[in-house]
Amino acid sequence: MKEKALNSPGFEIDPDLVITLDHGDPLMFEPFWKEVGHNATVTISGWEKMSYYACDTDDICWFLEPDFANEVLRLHRIVNNAATNGCHIIPGVGSTQLIHATLHALASIEARHPVNVVSAAPYYSMYSDINSMKSALYHWAGDAATFKGDDNFIEIVCSPNNPDGMIRHAVLSNNAGKRVHDMAYYWPHYTPMRGPADHDIMLFTLSKATGHAGTRIGWALIKDTDVAREMVNYITLNTNGVSRDSQVRAARILKVISDGYEFPNSNGAGQFFHIGRHLLADRWRRLRQAMEVLGKFSLPRFSTEFCEFFKEQAQTYPGFAWLRSEDESINDCGDFFKRINVLIRSGRLFGAGPNYVRINLMGSDAYFDGFIKRITSFG
Ligand code: PMP
């Protein structure tokens, strides 16, 4: 009931209602998928997909649905955002599971434990949560930029970066360390495509590529067969495979997007990345306007770059806004937003100070509109 109301066109947020912009829930893409309608619907009969095994049991990844793998490769070919040649594709229960699987795989190959896991601040808050898993193989060791250890490290490079949308490169130059590239936002609606990323370990997720966070499907592109095998071992122990039904749904969703580019007008809703970019551009325009009126926070500025996908100069429109307080009376941005009933995520959780906050810009229209209205009336 609540979700339905919040997503109805023209729904007005009650001034006392808490607006949740804390999590990166990607509901802004829902209208596109409503427009696509049955073209994106999947039907799985009661007798289908019953086996644990999705493909030949001799394959390294025995739970990979062939159709899902084909659609992943097809979309990467169309967008040209990742070099997939010779890569193993490993699906995961979201890229969250793949982050754990990758750390586990890389650390198990190392001789000394625990391996230090680092990422340059501000880093995605979930990375620092890995200690809750109490793994004996690896542990969180903080900001990569201030890491003083030897070569016993794994650096997670998130590019474009959550929370600030910046393009990132590894900051630790020691080649003996390992790197994981979290590419959740390397898609043309968020950032100009600078050609195919080509790293040993690249993680993607349906959650941010298409907005289907609830399907819980991510995929890893892995060059090294031993690493791929260890990741599969981890997922086998952890969830004994990855939902075949979810992979079928993910394949269908990816297919609709690819068809929209290879066979224009085929899906009834248009071209997803063009529409996604337009929606995000509009949100960023309104956000910048509202923040100017409020006059208390600054937003990152991005330079225009040539986008190999749109074949034109393009702007960056991250899924999150990374705000910095410019008002001396606001030391803790979290408190400020709490007072106006907006839940955000404090900069502290990203290894930055409380004078920073992250705001989800991918939420429903109702939440975003309500947020802009609340900010504007405060200014
Ligand atoms: N990596 C990054 C950078 C993210 O922002 C997220 C989601 N917020 C994830 C990984 C995990 O995504 P999921 O588990 O939904 O695939």
Image (cartoon, rainbow, N blue to C red):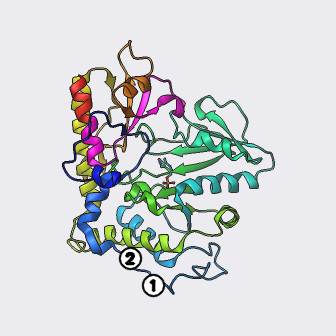
* Residue 86 position in % (x across, y down): 55, 69
Q: In which quarter of the image is residue 13?
A: top left
* Residue 343 position in % (x across, y down): 40, 35
Structural crowding at the residue carrying mark 1, measured as other residues with C-alpha within 10 Å and reported as few (<14), some (14–19) or many (≥20): few
What residue is pinned by disc 1? Answer: 45
On whether residue 346 falls in the magenta region, the answer is: yes
What are the residue bounds of the magenta stretch? 344-371
Q: Going 40% across and 28% down the picture, which residue do you hit? A: 338
Residues 218 and 313: in front is 218
Residues 48 and 347: in front is 48
> In whole angstroms, how far apart are the C-alphas of marks 2 and 1?
10 Å
**Viewport quadrant of the N terminus:** bottom left
Confirm whether residue 320 shows in the render: yes
Q: Is residue 246 left or right of residue 342?
A: right
Q: Is mark 2 on a helix, strand or loop?
A: loop
Q: Is residue 35 above or below residue 263?
A: above
Structural crowding at the residue carrying mark 2, measured as other residues with C-alpha within 10 Å and reported as few (<14), some (14–19) or many (≥20): some
**Residue type at numbered disc 2:** Val
**Residue type at numbered disc 1:** Ser
Mark 1 Cβ inside 8 Å of ligand 1:
no
Q: Going 61% across and 37% down the picture, which residue do you hit? A: 172
Q: Going 41% across and 39% down the picture, which residue do you hit? A: 166
What residue is pinned by disc 2? Answer: 42
Q: Is residue 111 above or below residue 30?
A: above
Q: Residue furthest right?
A: 111
* Residue 100 position in % (x across, y down): 63, 53
Q: In this view, does 196 lie to the left or right of 351?
A: left
- The nearer-to-camera label among 2 and 1 is 1
Q: In which quarter of the image is residue 18?
A: top left
Q: What element carries label 1?
A: loop
Which numbered dot is residue 247? none
On whether residue 188 falls in the magenta region, the answer is: no
